[in-house]
Amino acid sequence: MTQSPEHVRCLIIGSGPAGYTAAIYASRANLQPVEYCGLQPGGQLTQTTTVENFPGYPDGVDGNQMMMDIREQAEHFGADIRDGIIVKADLSEAPYTLTVEDGHIIKADTVIIATGASAKYLGLDDERKYNGLGVSACATCDGFFYRKKTVAVVGGGDTACEDALYLSGLAKKVYLIVRKPYLRASKVMQERVMEKENIEILFEHNTIGLFGEDGVEGAHLVKRKGEPDEEKVDIAIDGFFLAIGHKPNSDVFKEWLDTDEVGYIKKIDGTPRTKIPGVFVAGDVADPTYRQAITAAASGCQAAIEAERYLLDRELHTEDGISLTGMPFLIFIDVMKLVCYTMSSKALMSLIT
């Protein structure tokens, strides 16, 4: 027997800081949001240890604990948070049709996409072994823990150079491990990196492993791999930062929404709105620049507010049948004040006469 589609006012896809924050705001606005957590409930912060740069935690907080706190807050206000992955989307008309991996179909009046972006890894077993124990894909998030220590950054593009420069202001020494015999970064970034005394660029080096007892203590490298003068090299490091790019988790929506060449979903005029009315975006899936928990949470708030306004604009009509669809919220309030004033005046005149 075929199950009937479930109709919801607001569907949130993804469960990092953006998704959970959107759920808090949507719940408080009485949108009865349904949220599907996706591949990684809690998002990338569940892969880190202590978070020190999120407001409200003066002593820092475990990444998993912080995400559980935010999820609990969303559920407290009534969010229906579920495990599961959205595998198919049809955004051709509202209500929009989304399919869950188990075949369950949802018809949603509004959709908030907060699926995040996944860091690219080298594919080494040691990356998983030392994840949160010296391996990181976010220099801005974790660099603070490596003050006056030695770290390595993998990559040769602008992101890698930016991370190396950032870390050079904290760490004692920074190795920049570059697979090719040159940097792919812009000329300006290349010059800045090469001018930094505590950054050493290791050209034509490949990382083949990491080592350490209770955390990263060093990296196994191969210099000029495959060449006659190939040489194995070990370097002593305390932290290993990956800067070889991120992949936005936007594949399901690419048929319907505009993305850049990497796959980040394009927003309209810096807002959470997309080119499809009622479909909004939040967090790292639309942010190639900042990729921070606090900015993701803020965009989740914005997306939920936009969803609330969209539904209000769509649903409200005057008694005379004049559609208020598309009317800005504040203008609507002014109109209602005028209506109330007019009605009060008529009532007063009837009493006088």
Image (tube, grey):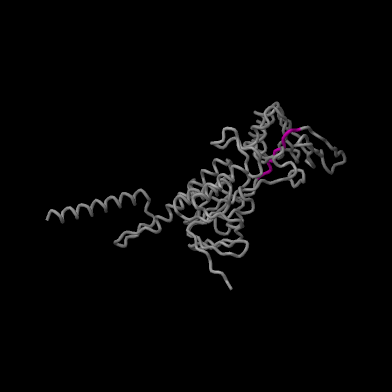
Given residues 331 and 40, the one toward you in this image is: 40
Number of numbered discs visible in the structure rendering: 0
Q: Is residue 238 magenta?
A: yes
- Which image quarter: residue 290? top right
- Which image quarter: residue 233? top right
- Which image quarter: residue 65? top right
In the image, is residue 164 above or below residue 116? above
In the image, is residue 58 above or below residue 332? above
Residue 45, percent from left and from top: 62, 43
Residue 251, percent from left and from top: 61, 56
Q: Is 250 displayed left or right of 234 in the figure?
A: left
Q: Quadrant of the N terminus?
A: bottom right
Q: Is residue 299 magenta?
A: no
Residue found at x 36% / y 48%:
330
In the image, is residue 4 above or below residue 158? below
Q: Quadrant of the C terminus?
A: bottom left
Residue pushed farthest right?
228
Given residues 5 and 203, the one toward you in this image is: 5
Residue 40, percent from left and from top: 64, 51
Q: Is 312 displayed left or right of 290 in the figure?
A: left
Given residues 209 and 276, the one toward you in this image is: 209
Residue found at x 87% / y 41%:
228
Residue pushed farthest bottom?
1
Q: Is 209 displayed left or right of 22 in the figure?
A: right
Residue pushed farthest front?
76
Residue found at x 58% / y 35%:
53
In the image, is residue 28 above or below residue 95? above
Q: Which residues are magenta?
A: 237-245
Residue 81, percent from left and from top: 56, 54
